[in-house]
Image (cartoon, grey):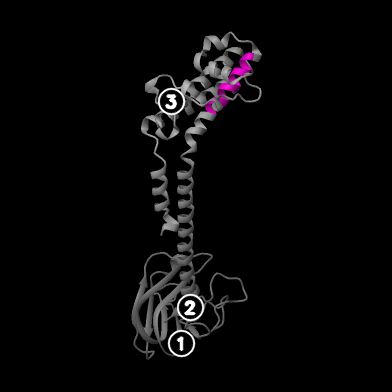
Amino acid sequence: MEWFWREAALAKLRRQTSQAGERAQSFARRARVTADEANVTHTSEPWEPLREAIASELYRQSAYWAACALSEDPSSGIPSTDAGPPWEALEDRLFNPPEGGVATPDALRQLARTGSFTYFAELSRDELRRARLSLRWLARALLARFDERLAPLKAIRAQRYRRLGLLVVLLLGAALGATWVREVRLRRTELSAGKSWRLSSSYGTGGCTSPEQKCPENTGFFFHTRVNDHNPWIEFDLATPQQVSIVEVENRQDCCFERALPLAVEISRDHKSWQEVARRDADFSTWRASFDAVQARWVRLRIPQPGTLHLHAVRIYP
């Protein structure tokens, strides 16, 4: 169970790594939303100084909220924002500017500390580009730092779901396999295979010759009684008395499904007295009639009224 659910491993990680509180998560959400707005602002139009300045200020705000999230997380090692702005408490390595950004870590720290839209709007095109690249990098780095300690928990949860998914697939496969095995075993016990059958009347053309149920002609039925037969039926002779509990019927495939209604399943031991064991009154493509096992040598499908009977296949099982 532990291999699938991973509860012990998750509990151990939770003990080793404190969960970020709701306040820290709220700050992180603000950082992500602000960064998304900055991305849209920067990319929605061709380069334009005011948009570049707005994007730079939004990235700076995103970095600020990310720093606040880190300061609210005891495991980050960063003092709480209650002691003042978070910039001074951040490690120097977090301010290493990216390629193409501002020249020094101190310059990036100063941008984060004192930057503003009015400040960015007065920069030259090259200075503004460097400021935007640097602040975007800082916001992403701080969010990555916040998310870093949650990665092992997420990895184990993902592993749990993958393994549970595997278990579901295995169980589903086992269930389908068991169903397939039952069907194979059932087919092997088919009592009607190769057994002779006869009709109340014959249409005269189409259909098979007893005991076949598969005809050379590609028709939607293997037998067809006369139209408006007084009491149409097909009767199977199982040769010896057999235990019968299932009769599976496939209706005609190309048309006229309603003609097979109502359809009664009847059995007989002596070919004189008949007992109805199942009846179908609703339309069907395939009908599996199941009933308490009975001894029978003859099995008959009958429409207890004037009509026409034609079916695609009939299978009888113990």
Do the residues under discs 2 and 3 have CB atoms within 8 angstroms? no
Q: Report the front residue among 225 and 168.
A: 168
Q: Secondary structure at mark 1?
A: strand
Write down the residue under mark 3.
Answer: 68
Q: Three-letter amino acid code at disc 2? A: Arg
* Residue 232 lies in quadrant: bottom left
Do the residues under discs 1 and 2 have CB atoms within 8 angstroms? no
Please tell me whether mark 1 or mark 2 is closer to you in this view. 2
Disc 3: CA contacts within 10 A as few (<14), some (14-19) or many (>=20): many
- Identify the residue shown where x is 48% and y is 73%: 181
- Identify the residue shown where x is 46% and y is 48%: 156
Q: Report the front residue among 19 and 90.
A: 90
Relative to 208, is 164 above or below? above
Q: Report the front residue among 236 and 85.
A: 85
Q: Earlier in the sequence, mark 1 or mark 3?
A: 3
Spot occupied by residue 288 in the image (x, y as percentages of width and height): 42, 71
**Segment tinted magenta in the rendering:** 127-140
Write down the residue under mark 2.
Answer: 185
Q: Three-letter amino acid code at disc 1? A: Asp
Numbered label tally: 3
Mark-to-mark CA distance, 2 and 3: 67 Å
Asked if one can make out residue 285 in the rendered structure from this viewpoint, the answer is no
